[in-house]
Structure formats: structure tokens, C-alpha cells
């Protein structure tokens, strides 16, 4: 059987290179080596390449960051705060838990080193909660929950989007290492579309239980939808970064469909997308669903630049963000000015 030598040469035109730890002096150097390696090393380098395209696109895409998982307990608080502070993202959509644990630390509480084989019954007797190999003081959680309830007591009896409410909480986060503090200072919208499924929700429940119906504020989740859709419609392009999956990933993707249906507009989907996940697509769950699958829904553009790395976030995110920061991809990127009047996004410049 004859071999098509030209076709064979086309397939075998790029050799895998060994990662060279002698020459790699920085995170950026290491990730650059990853690009010529294989498996998840190359996938991670591809995520950095997609990130660069997001940040350097002259059309200035709105970059939306979706956050799930034990990211604060895992030590990623300052990494995410730096993404906000240095202009690497424009909008955050998060679980309430990520935002709560940032707020908890902003009040002076900490996460502590433990291990996964501890005596959980003994921990319970000490009011210590375990997040895999990390410990938190439940007494500190309770004080923070009650502090959130007291903040909420000062609010008028009206509906708030999660963005509005979280920005109010963020004004109480004075810690310079806080994600919420940085977002508040830069005017970055932070949404939590499933806010009740968190300790912030516990604080709101304490407030609800002790406030007469006529005086209660409330979180309006459909207002969240309306506000996010306006961001999508005013942006020239959108780009997404998914850390894990869950509600934030689905909600950000659904915003593309909501924009098309609610305003009868032609929506192309996100122009850029990359995700960091440990879940696999064959289970059918959202956290593992591929970006290609999202294209079938019109949520990610058919022409999107995209990548996925299957890696735990406490490993992948510092490498990705560290590489981007060291290469200075966002140095010329100016922040958007989100100007809100009630539930209306007046301008996005």
C-alpha cells in the first residue's frame, strides 16, 4: 500500500517539545513551554492564548467571569482580586458562596489548614466547618451572617437586583485584598443569580424572619436577567471565562438567548470563551459541558475562539492569570464605565 508522503508530512509537521525547567524563570516562561507540550499543559497554554485575544481585541469585548467552587478556601482570593484590580475582567457572575467567603475574610476572619481525614464529629462539637482540607470558624460565619442581616435592615422596602445588593455589601468590605472591595472601587458589576443558596442567603433569611412584610426589601432575580441582557446588547462583543460551571456558567450563557428573545435581536453568541473544569462532558452535567455544545444553543459564536483545560482551579487559574499579568496583555486596557439608573444601563463606555 502506497503512503501519501505529503499528507503524512502535513500531520507530522510539529514536534512535541520537552518542558525545560532550566530555562523557565517565570510563570510566563513555563506556560510558554506548555504550548509545545501535550495533554492539559497545552490546553492551559491555549486558554492563555484565548485570554490574550480577549484582552487585545480592539473592539474591546466585555469579559465576563463565572465563578464556582471553593475558590476562596482554596487560596485564590487575591488571584481573582488581581483580575479585577488590573482590568483582566469587566463583569463577575458568581455563586453566593464565593462572594460570602471573600466578605467573611474582609471582616478579619480566616480559612485554616486542615486535612480531609479529620474527625468531623469532633469538628462539629467545636463549631469548626470543613471544606475538604480547609477549616473555617462557624462562629465567625454566624457573626458575618448576622452582620449581613443588620446591613440589610437599613435598606428600603423595594426590589434589588443581586448586583445592586452585592455592591452595597461590597461597600462594607474595606480589605484591600478583597474581590468585592476591588469590584466596588472599579465599578465592576457583580451578579449572584442564586444568592439564596449561600451564607448571604442565610443572612437575608435572618433579616426576613425579623422584619415585618411591609418593611422588607427583596432580591429580584428577573431584574438580574434584565440588567445582564442590557450589558450583552450594549457590548460590541462578549467574552467569557468559566471557572467550574453551575448556575454562573448557565446564566451567563442563557443571557445570550434572553437578549435574542426578549429584545428580538440577532445575537451571535460569545466571541471568546475558555473554561477551567474538572468535570467531563459524558456525565451530561453543565460543569463538564463543552463550549462546542454551547454553540448548538447559539450561546457561543460559531466563529468563537475557545479553549478548555481539564484541571483543578487552584492549579490552573494562578498559572493562567500569572502568565497574562507577566506578559502585560491588559496594560492598555481601560475600564468600562457602567452607568446605571435603577434597572437601566444608561451607558457602557
Image: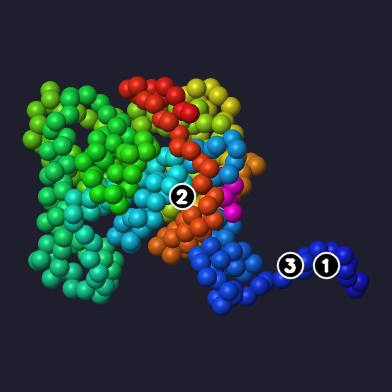
What segment carries the magenta color?
49-54
Which badge, 1 or 3, is on the more N-terminal residue? 1
From the image, tell me which residue sits under label 1: 9
Q: Is residue 93 above or below residue 228?
A: below
Residue placed most toward the observer, 196 or 339: 339
- 274 magenta-colored: no
Residue placed most toward the observer, 35 or 39: 35
Residue placed most toward the observer, 70 or 58: 58
Q: Residues within 10 Å of mark 2 (few under 14, many from 20)?
A: many
| Residue 157 placement (x, y as % from top left) | 18, 24
Disc 2 secondary structure class: strand
Is residue 162 visible in the rendered structure shown here? Answer: no
Left or right placement of residue 237 versus residue 210 in this view: right
Which badge, 3 or 2, is on the more N-terminal residue? 3
Which badge, 2 or 1, is on the more N-terminal residue? 1
From the image, tell me which residue sits under label 2: 242
Q: Is residue 255 above or below residue 94?
A: above
**Residue at the bottom extreme of this rendering:** 22
Q: Which residue does the image show at 37% across and 25% down from the upper left?
A: 340
Which SS type dominates the magenta stretch?
Answer: helix
Q: Which residue does the image show at 23% across and 45% down from the upper left?
A: 174
Distance from disc 2 to disc 1, alpha carbons, whole Å, reads 37 Å
Disc 1 secondary structure class: helix
From the image, tell me which residue sits under label 3: 14
| Residue 275 placement (x, y as % from top left) | 50, 53
Q: Are marks 3 and 2 in contact (CB under 8 Å)?
A: no
Amino acid at each position: 500500500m502506497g503512503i501519501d508522503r505529503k499528507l503524512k508530512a502535513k500531520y507530522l509537521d510539529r514536534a512535541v517539545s520537552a518542558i525545560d525547567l532550566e530555562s523557565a524563570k517565570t510563570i510566563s516562561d513555563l506556560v510558554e513551554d506548555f504550548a509545545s507540550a501535550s495533554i492539559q499543559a497545552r490546553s492551559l497554554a491555549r486558554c492563555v492564548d484565548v485570554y490574550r485575544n480577549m484582552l487585545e481585541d480592539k473592539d474591546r469585548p466585555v469579559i465576563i467571569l463565572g465563578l464556582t467552587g471553593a475558590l476562596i478556601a482554596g487560596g485564590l482570593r487575591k488571584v481573582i482580586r488581581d483580575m479585577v484590580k488590573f482590568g483582566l475582567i469587566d463583569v463577575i457572575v458568581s455563586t453566593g458562596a464565593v462572594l460570602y467567603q471573600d466578605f467573611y475574610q474582609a471582616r478579619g476572619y480566616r480559612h485554616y489548614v486542615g486535612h480531609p481525614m479529620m474527625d468531623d464529629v469532633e469538628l462539629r462539637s467545636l463549631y469548626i466547618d470543613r471544606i475538604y482540607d480547609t477549616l473555617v470558624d462557624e462562629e465567625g460565619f454566624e457573626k458575618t451572617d448576622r452582620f449581613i442581616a443588620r446591613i440589610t435592615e437599613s435598606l428600603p422596602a423595594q426590589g434589588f437586583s443581586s448586583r445592586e445588593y452585592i455592591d452595597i455589601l461590597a461597600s462594607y468590605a474595606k480589605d484591600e485584598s478583597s474581590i468585592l472591595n476591588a469590584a466596588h472601587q472599579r465599578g465592576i458589576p457583580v451578579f449572584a443569580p442564586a444568592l439564596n443558596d449561600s451564607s448571604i442567603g442565610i443572612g437575608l433569611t435572618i433579616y426576613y424572619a425579623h422584619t415585618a412584610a411591609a418593611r422588607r426589601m427583596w432580591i429580584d432575580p428577573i431584574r438580574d436577567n434584565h440588567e445582564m441582557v442590557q450589558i450583552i446588547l450594549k457590548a460590541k462583543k462578549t467574552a467569557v471565562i468559566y471557572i467550574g460551571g453551575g448556575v454562573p456558567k448557565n446564566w451567563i450563557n442563557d443571557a445570550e438567548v434572553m437578549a435574542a428573545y426578549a429584545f428580538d435581536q440577532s445575537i451571535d453568541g460569545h466571541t471568546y470563551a475558555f473554561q477551567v473544569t474538572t468535570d467531563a462532558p459524558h456525565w451530561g452535567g453543565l460543569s463538564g459541558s463543552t463550549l462546542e455544545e454551547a454553540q448548538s444553543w447559539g450561546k457561543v459564536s460559531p466563529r468563537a475562539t475557545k479553549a478548555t483545560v481539564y484541571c483543578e482551579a487552584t492549579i490552573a487559574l494562578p498559572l493562567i492569570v500569572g502568565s497574562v499579568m507577566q506578559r502585560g496583555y491588559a496594560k492598555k486596557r481601560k475600564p468600562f464605565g457602567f452607568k446605571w439608573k435603577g434597572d437601566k444601563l444608561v451607558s457602557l463606555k
